Amino acid sequence: MSDFDYIIVGSGINGLVAAAMLGKKGKRVLVLERNARIGGCLATAEITEPGFIHDIMATTMVLFLTSPAYGVLGKDLEARGLEFAHADLPTGVLRPDGSHVIYSKDRQRNIATFEMLAKGDGQTFDREMNAFGADAGFVFALLGGNLWSTTTLKTVAREAWKRGLRGLAAWFGEALVPARAYLETTYASEDIHALWAPWALHCGLGPESSYSAEMTKVIAFAVELAGCPVAKGGVQTLLTAFERLIADQGGQIRTSADVDRLLPGPGNGAGGVALADGTEIRARSGIIASVTPNQLYGRLLRQWPVKQPDGITDDLRRFRYGKGNMQIHYALDAPPQWKSGGELGQVALLHLTPGLDGVSRASNEAERGMLPAVPTICVGQPTALDPSRAPAGKAILWLQLPETPRHIKGDAACELQTPADGRWTEALREAYADRIEAILERHIDGFKTNVLSRKAYSPADLEAMNMNLVGGDPYGGFCGLDQFFLWRPFKSAVNHRTHVAGLYHIGASTHPGPGLGGGSGFLLASTLK
């Protein structure tokens, strides 16, 4: 007999949430991680200079702080060392001419800011946020609930009763509007368009994508409510808290444990796993795989005794990954001095972009395999929130480039020599990072002389660190409408079940998609007995 009720393959945020949730139910859980560390897209290390603490991939914890998972596990994690650092100025945008908008957690300040940009835009923003707040319960039930469930059916039925069928259809139609259409028909100010357009990228979308407007409203609402917090000391403190919680519940986490394949149990249901070193481990109740569809169906189930349905094979062939991602980290001798105003240095996540059209152009270039000529740059300033991330008087910058091609076909600026095979090289990575640095230099006084060290990660580097980041895609697959909600990861998917009894699929590739909320792990663990 196995000592474990459930085995979880993968230790990203969804795997850890599932393990802790099941542990609260008295289940004994084993988490297996192929890498030498846990965390998936959560990792903290001194990658530039000694004493400079960087979150290598994900850093902003607003989705976790506002998640149902945190509502259940938050106190347990806080008791084991988790603490957040908050910012009153969570986000903003800076344009090439120095014009900028700063978004606060203070509604009245935001209204006044938007009114100064264009008369009426502040009042419009207030109405939009109030309207979203009235619908928030319904929106978050759809975004974060099991869609194939009686609970969701009842939720939709209540809305149909309240709004009428035509009214409900109109609501869904409005929810599918692209961000560009919404922004251009709602706000007069192009600066406000520029403020919100980049946030569609953080959802794996672009400004012209269906439902991207609704996601920008979700983000505006959540960021005004909870800001863009970071974990004090780095996301490693969150991972350590999970490790302690799972151990206290009687569970185990094993690193450097590469699961090679799944093992059948009675009736050809999921019975256990075989590691790459030949070790076999059995589970009494089931296996939970926090991996991409390709890893689950193409690798872990490759020797399964029962042929998988033809539809799964077709679905796997059609499954698409999205744009890649690139990370750049800086150790600075002093906090950055932004030329356009000192308050910019207190913004947690600042986007550098020409505006709505600039985001659209760069996103389209990346989707076509081109290095964007003027990419959207997301600049995180963790030391503005958490000074412990760097030695006294010094600072770090966390840069994310969400419009980066997985396979390179050329350079939209016609400046960089790209490899014939389309693969990222170290030389191209550093040359492209130089393009980004040149933009920073135009906005920050004395930036070049202030840099102590730089560390860049291309999409290929990110995939090498985490096999679930296929081509550097951090969102577990393309997030367009046809591969999301009811249809994630496949058109035939039903919540987190698979065609194998006792085998469950979670992670960014499954509903409710990517992000640090741990949504799929929470949803599945909430339903398991």
Image: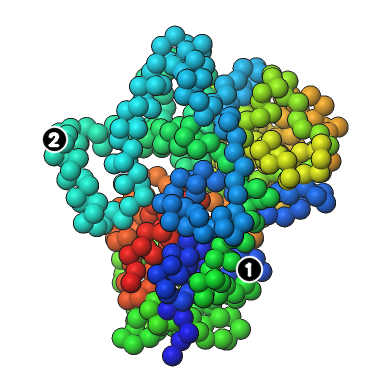
* Label 2 SS: loop
From where the camera sits, is residue 315 visible? no
- Residue 515: image x %, image y %? 49, 49
Image mark for residue 12: none
Q: Position of residue 381 (x, y in %)?
A: 67, 37
For the N terminus, the quadrant is bottom left
- Residue type indicated by callout 1: Asn
Q: Residue 320, relative to residue 213: is it above or below? A: below
Which corner quadrant of the image does residue 165 belong to? top left
| Residue 347 visible in the current orientation | yes
Tell which of 455 and 5 is nearer to you.
Answer: 5
Which residue occupies the foreground of this view, 377 or 320?
377
Q: Quick check: 406 above or below 40?
A: above
What percent of the width, then of the height, locates residue 29?
48, 74
Q: How many marks?
A: 2
| SS label for mark 1 | loop
Indicate the quadrant containing the C terminus: top left, top right, bottom left or bottom right. Answer: bottom left
Q: Which residue is mark 2?
A: 164
- At x 40%, y 45%, the residue is 480
424 left or right, relative to 105: right
Residue nearer the viewer, 91 or 421: 91
Instruction: Decide if residue 454 is on the left or right side of residue 14.
Output: right
When the figure is inspected, residue 319 is found, relative to residue 209, above or below; the finding is below
Residue under numbered circle 1: 35
Residue 246 at x, y = what percent?
Answer: 53, 69
Residue at 13% over, 39% down: 161
Residue farthest bottom in this picture: 1
Give neighbour class at mark 1: few <14, some 14-19, many 20+ (Cα, 10 Å): some
Q: Amino acid at mark 2?
A: Gly
Q: Residues within 10 Å of mark 2 (few under 14, many from 20)?
A: few
Tell me the residue at 51%/63% (across/down).
16
